[in-house]
Image: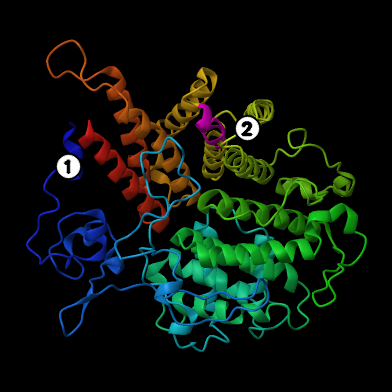
Amino acid sequence: MPQNLASFTGNSHRHTLPRGMACATCRRRKIKCDGHKPCKQCRRSSHTTDCQYPLVARNGAQRSQRPMTIKLETPIAVLRTSSYDDNSSIFFQGPPDSEEIPLAWTMPVSVGIAASPPPKDETRPSASHMLDPVIENPPLDVIERLVDAFFGNFSQVGFFLDVAAFRHSALLAVPFNSCQRPLPVLLTAVCAWGSRFSPALRHPVYNEDAFLVYTLQNMNHNLDGDHPKRVLHSIQAHVLVSLYYFTLGRPMEGIYHSNAAVSLALSAGLHLIKSTQSRDSEIQDTPLRSPCSLSDLAERIDGFWTVVIVNNYWAASFGSPSAIQYCDTPIDTPWPLDLDDHVSPELFELPVGCLIVDGFSTLALHSKASILLERAISFSANNADDFDDMESDAFDVLLDQFMLSLPLGLGLGCGDELKPRLLVLQTLTHAAIIRLHAHRCHTSDESRRKYLTAAAAVINIITNTDFSTWRHIDPIMGILWTTVGEVFVAELSNAEILGGGAAGSLTEQYQDLTFCLETILSAMRSFSSIPLMERFCVRLEEAYANTLLEN
């Protein structure tokens, strides 16, 4: 057994603290805790804020520190907050240590990776838990630093407004709620992200928690007033908050805001840009005027497809029903174009073709890849008992065609800013292939070949990518890499370990599988500062270690 796996199978469970008194992180990872706050293990992994110990009542009984959770009620307009209710948590179904909540990503060949771990980031309070600080008019220097931190680090899909125009309006020396500036909840959502990216900029009043609480408490006022872009800005705010909770791995809050963004986008007719571009939206309370410039039109096109991607992230990752019924929802909005393409008046004449014929911008390809993944998961789930070979073969051809439309690699000719997006595009597509063929990989040689080839392709991408210069990565990669890791864990559980040669020699297959798993885990550990990535990395480590023990 490789030496670096000793922590999985050795004596990491033995420590001098009383049973159950280790910090939450060490108990979850089953590693030795020294009892300090923060403990050595949390300091080493730079997760000092996550070093939380169980509370002990006067009678000596433990009370688990659980996160405050926002209670979501109405489907779109009203966000009411309440204190955390143990029985309402979607993360805990049973004792505090019970974490076996199945996720859509768990495949039939899975060896038991529980796909929805409970939230580790317990430092994010609910809106009802904190006093609302006075942030009605944050200093411009604070806003400037946080906005720049956001745009300098936000590498994932999600921001669809014109960056230069947004920054300019955000820094205008006019009142915070002026129509010349971004909608307040959008600006505070951006500042919350910026503060999260830059702990060094943390302000005693204008900090991540304060901006997040303000955003949540005022989200139901998004459509009030006469801000000219209140609909688009409301959608953008919901998208950013949804992705914020996606990064933390908190589906209840995140799916709510994703669904709210979808509802607003569909109600405003963003899915029917060509049909509605010459008339106002039919929403009486939230009018969306006709675009007055190509830049406005570009924001609406990009906004719709961004909402589609975020919706598909949640549907694919946490098994939530898609808020967009693709078979029943007419869509004539053109595929998004690259920034330079938006200057052409011919944008109004773009044909709405099929999925593969047009739309080769990065955002368009990202939208298509996310749709294909969501459809592959939905198709596999709906046909688990009675698999339709003809429909599956047609879907398989579509995936093959789409794969050919993607850029070949992340190496030469690929700018540094584009590499993270291309990584996501390629991995999304390979994950869709894995999910489509997972049900037949043990009964069809062709499905098994494509299933394993897609997983191997992801390993090849990782080994040929230098992550040392990457500051951030799209959190969806934690789930995608776990999906690929499950393939190799399942193969490892059935592999022959010892060869027929020298005593104790390992088979080539066994060595290849362990190499693939170590490659994935190494990449995931590089971005363990992302809570969602860290949790799935721990899960994959545990499944890997358990498989090694069983063998």
Mark 2 vs mark 1: which is more N-terminal?
A: 1
Relative to 90, does residue 347 appear above or below in the rendering? above
Residue at 54% x, 30% y: name it: 437
User: Where residue 14 appears, x then y in whole percent?
Assistant: 10, 54
Outermost residue to the left: 16
Say whether residue 254 is left or right of residue 33.
right
Decide: is 19 above or below 470: below
Q: State the residue at coordinates (81%, 78%).
A: 285
Determine if the magenta segment contains residue 437.
Answer: yes
Q: Which residue was labeled with disc 2?
A: 406
Most frequent secondary structure within the magenta stretch: helix
Residue nearest the observer in this picture, 502 or 423: 502
Closest to the observer, 146 or 92? 92
Instruction: Point out the residue furthest to the right here.
Output: 278
Quarter of the image where one finds residue 432:
top right
Q: Secondary structure at mark 2?
A: loop
Q: Is residue 284 visible?
A: yes
Q: Quadrant of the C terminus?
A: top left
Tell me, yes or no, whether the highlighted magenta stretch contains residue 342.
Answer: no
**The label number, if any, that marks residue 9 in the structure image:** 1
Q: Is residue 416 left or right of residue 87?
A: right
What residue range appears in magenta? 432-440
Query: What's under tag 2, amino acid-wise?
Result: Leu
Mark 1: give few (<14), some (14-19) or many (20+) Cα within 10 Å.
Answer: some
Camera sees residue 411: no
Mark pair 2, 1: CA separation: 41 Å
Residue 403, percent from left and from top: 62, 29
Q: Using the image, determine if residue 191 lies above or below residue 457.
A: below
